[in-house]
Image (cartoon, rainbow, N blue to C red):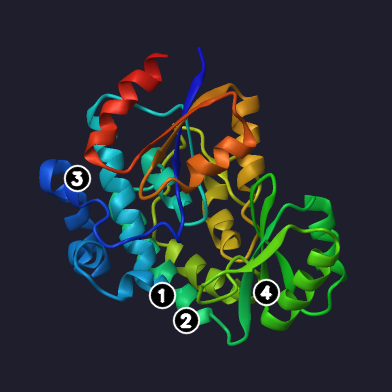
Amino acid sequence: MGKTVFMFPGQGAQYVGMGHDFYEQIPVCREMFELAGRASGLDVAALCFEENEQINITEYTQIAMLATEVAILKAVEEKGIRPDITGGLSLGEYGALAAGGVMSEEDVFRIVRKRGIYMQEAVPSGGAMTAVLGLDTEMIETICAETAGTVSIANYNCPGQIVITGEESAVQAAAEKLTAAGAKRCVPLKVSGPFHSAMLAGAGEKLAKELESVEIHDIAVPYIANVTADYVTDKSEVKPLLQKQVSSSVRWQQSVERMIADGADTFIEIGPGKTLSGFMRKISRDVKVCNVEKVEDLEKLDSVLSI
């Protein structure tokens, strides 16, 4: 019997209106949006459902995305579906923590609101991120290491798609070298800072202080950490890994490969968009994948899980 993974996307998939049908139709989903509002001190429902510019600003994006993910998670759970493993990309790791009961919903909402603020505040001028398409991972690592200034890999998304991050001048210089080395394209990303780079270490330190007051529960459902691409088995590791995650590479491809090696054959993406489902098609075509973004998507789960 194969294993089922709940996976949660990160920033970039947000849009106005996400989760609204769950909010309107399923009471427990509405409760999650309201809890997110109380925990964050924001009108999260308005942030998600009403036209606004804030939804694309990091300090607001993160709580909006997580509220939507946890709300949809509750709808999936109401169908009696439970994961064998959880994982999430960057911000999505907090969805995984909620799904596995490692943190309470209230705590993940409160912490992610702070995480968004700290990451926004820590953004230095002159930071950038660029997606590198169609080049060998080792070549990208080597060129980043040889480029003057701060530039490193932010995301190992899937074969053929790596994101680099750091000082704008260093990222541009690395991109030129990567193009010369054979990259199909280097695409600058519209982000507000060099996320998952050493330049955000200060945000991680602030987050660590905020995490001191959070209760971490025993890890009943295995989850994979972005920093290590490995299972977290000791709850004492959770907080240090979340601190490092802010300024470390997100090893998503490696995380998925580890889960597949451990018997995972069904991956359910919970949250806005199909970003992770798209990555899955490039990582492995031997597993079942579906996303739950709308209420009607809940109907797909029965057929996917029964195959």
Crowd rating for badge 1 (residues with CA inside 10 Å; few <14, some 14–19, many 20+): some
Between label 2 and label 3, give the one nearer the viewer: 3
Crowd rating for badge 3 (residues with CA inside 10 Å; few <14, some 14–19, many 20+): many
- Residue 24: x %, y % from top left: 11, 48
Element class at badge 4? strand
The label on residue 166 is 4
User: Which residue is depicted at the point 29% across and 52% down?
Assistant: 68
- Residue 229: x %, y % from top left: 64, 43
Give the amino acid type for the residue marked by disc 1 in the picture: Ile
Residue 136 seen in render: yes
Between label 1 and label 4, give the one nearer the viewer: 4
Question: Could you tell which of marks 3 and 4 lies nearer the N-terminus?
Answer: 3
Q: Disc 1 marks which residue?
A: 117
Give the amino acid type for the residue marked by disc 2 in the picture: Glu
Q: Disc 2 marks which residue?
A: 121
C-alpha distance separating marks 2 and 4 = 16 Å
Relative side of 101 to 253, left or right: left
Q: Disc 3 marks which residue?
A: 22
Element class at badge 2? helix
The label on residue 221 is none
